[in-house]
Amino acid sequence: MENYQKRLDNAIENLKQRADIADVNKENIITFLNQRSAEDISIRRQLKYFYTLTSILKEFNKDFSLCNKKDIIDLINVNPSEKSPNFKLWDESHGELRSKRRQAFSPPGGKPRHSQ
């Protein structure tokens, strides 16, 4: 069985040593995780939050506490030519899945179509 608490502890210790992430964002992430822990959010979910936040910071290293709505919209709506190769591969591989999900349902008010 995986030891998620140890993985989270190691991830936080490694975060503290990273030079590519601003100290204020390190503090914000740790505070956020402490709040989730106090809310009894699972360690696995906290790890997911941790990895999501740190990967966002690779593209957008601005103080999270100073971000406004426009900053978040700009982060999400990256021009496709500016997206990292990993995002492009993920987007292409999941495009077919999204298409199949759309096809599984008929227009509003209709019955769902079941895929074969």
Image: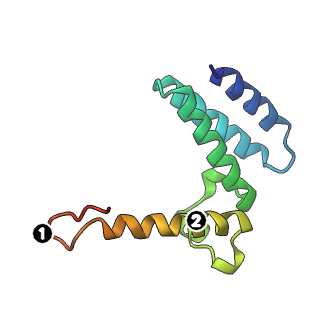
Q: Nearer the viewer, residue 49 or 7?
A: 7
Q: Residue at x 46, y 63 (%)?
A: 97
Q: Residue at x 70, y 47 (%)?
A: 54
Residue 111 % position (x, y): 15, 65
At label 2, which amino acid type do we have? Answer: Ser
Q: Residue at x 48, y 28 (%)?
A: 41
Q: Quadrant of residue 1?
A: top right
Q: Quadrant of residue 51?
A: top right
**Relative to residue 103, is residue 43 depicted above or below?**
above
Q: Quadrant of residue 18?
A: top right
Q: Can you see residue 26? A: yes
Pointer 2 local density, CA inside 10 Å: few below 14, some 14–19, many at least 20: few
Left or right for 108, reference 30 = left
Q: Which residue is mark 1?
A: 109
Q: Nearer the viewer, mark 2 or mark 1?
A: 2
Q: Which mark is residue 93?
A: 2
Residue 61 % position (x, y): 74, 57
Q: Nearer the viewer, residue 40 or 105?
A: 105
Residue ranking furthest to the front: 116
**Relative to residue 113, is residue 14 depicted above or below?**
above
Q: Assign a secondary structure to mark 2.
A: helix
Q: Can you see residue 71? A: no
Left or right for 16, reference 34 = right
Left or right for 19, reference 22 = right
Mark 2 and mark 1: span between their CA atoms? 30 Å
**Relative to residue 14, is residue 20 depicted above or below?**
below
